[in-house]
Image (cartoon, rainbow, N blue to C red):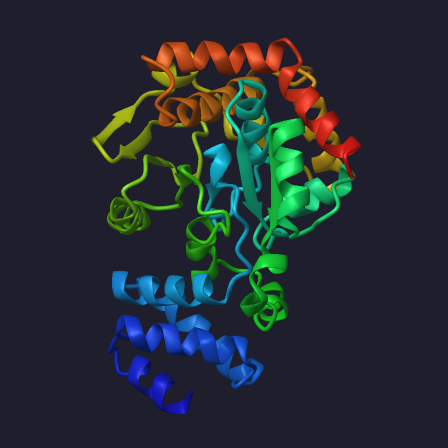
Amino acid sequence: MKKILQHLFEHKTLSRQQASEVLINISQGNYNEHEIASFTTVYLMRSITIHELQGFWDALMKLCVKTDLSPFKVMDIVGTGGDGKNTFNISTLSCFIVAGAGQKVAKHGNYGVTSTSGASNVMEQLGYKFKNETGALRHEVEEAGICFLHAPLFHPALKAVAPIRKNLAVRTFFNMLGPMVNPAEPEYQLVGVYNLEMARIYNYLLQQTGKPFTIIHSLDGYDEISLTDDTKVITQLGERVYTPEEIGKRMVSPQDIYGGNTVEEASKLFKKILKGEGSWAQNAVVIANAAMALQCSGNYDSHEQAYKAAVDSLETGKAYNCLEKLVSLQ
């Protein structure tokens, strides 16, 4: 690792192969925590290259516990995290709205590192039991329209870095990798990123998969459609900027989408919104994200149709029924 660190400290970059080898060595416990922390810090001080990110991706997918959900053509809605905004669990809520609209979902997530409550925190609090058996996950997708993939159960390579990430409590390149390493390799993806540089890198990487995708970035720094500012939307067909009025009817304020101070608060808020009892702004934000995801599936002729399907899923209780069904299967 000393040679690698020296190489990086000289402002040099890693090849795809080198990056892959480093992450495999990390997973095998070949480096101590100080070396890993130093390595991680490099990517807080400069941008990651596409080759480096591809190498890290290669390693994680090679080492991960795969789960085959291909018969369902599942979707994932996931943000990189690390935007430091501490919003409520917008992506996870949107997943349930999408499932309620009939699109199967395999949500990939982890405990929060830079926010109070990550997807795994809230799902655990709501009574979901983490698992990696394909049979059980398929059953959940069949019955509830959705399953949850807790990253550490599928990525043993992340075990070595979990305490370091927690202690650093800042965004690292693992945030960048999260949306790319769903072990179910979903057919459709809505990915939220925290800056335009990451949007460019994800656009390049997701184009390689040949699968439909949508990348979103709120221009004031959120890794989701926040409706607090215009949103950059990139798909395999091109890109454009949408105003809050175009994709969410009107603008909201940052205070409207605050996520609370504890996991308990976050999960109570999660349930309240999913029951359709959230504020106008809270409902608008999750519907806007769910609608963009539904449009990505290609099952709707227009954004307006996808938006109506998302509204229907939330307001008729279909989305909440998916959560109740999922929890009852545990």
Q: Is residue 164 above or below residue 301?
A: below
Counting every numbered tag in the picture gives 0
Residue at the (26%, 83%) spot, across then down: 10
Q: Is residue 154 above or below residue 187?
A: below
Which image quarter is the N terminus in?
A: bottom left
Say which quarter of the image contains residue 293: top left
Say which quarter of the image contains residue 190: top left
**Camera-side residue: 222 or 119?**
119
Image location of residue 38, percent across then percent down = 46, 78
Q: Is residue 240 left or right of residue 220?
A: left
Q: Is residue 282 left or right of residue 245?
A: right
Say which quarter of the image contains residue 7: bottom left
Does residue 16 appear in this view?
A: yes
State the residue lying farthest toward the bottom: 2
Does residue 172 appear in this view?
A: no
Which image quarter is the C terminus in?
A: top right
Residue at the (53%, 29%) spot, across then down: 104
Image location of residue 34, percent across then percent down = 54, 82
Image location of residue 218, percent across then percent down = 38, 34
Residue at the (42%, 68%) spot, across then down: 59
Residue at the (32%, 62%) spot, across then down: 54
Image location of residue 249, percent across then percent down = 42, 12
**Camera-side residue: 152 or 134?**
134
**Camera-side residue: 165 or 209?**
209
Q: Is residue 131 left or right of residue 23?
A: right
**Camera-side residue: 125 or 85?**
125
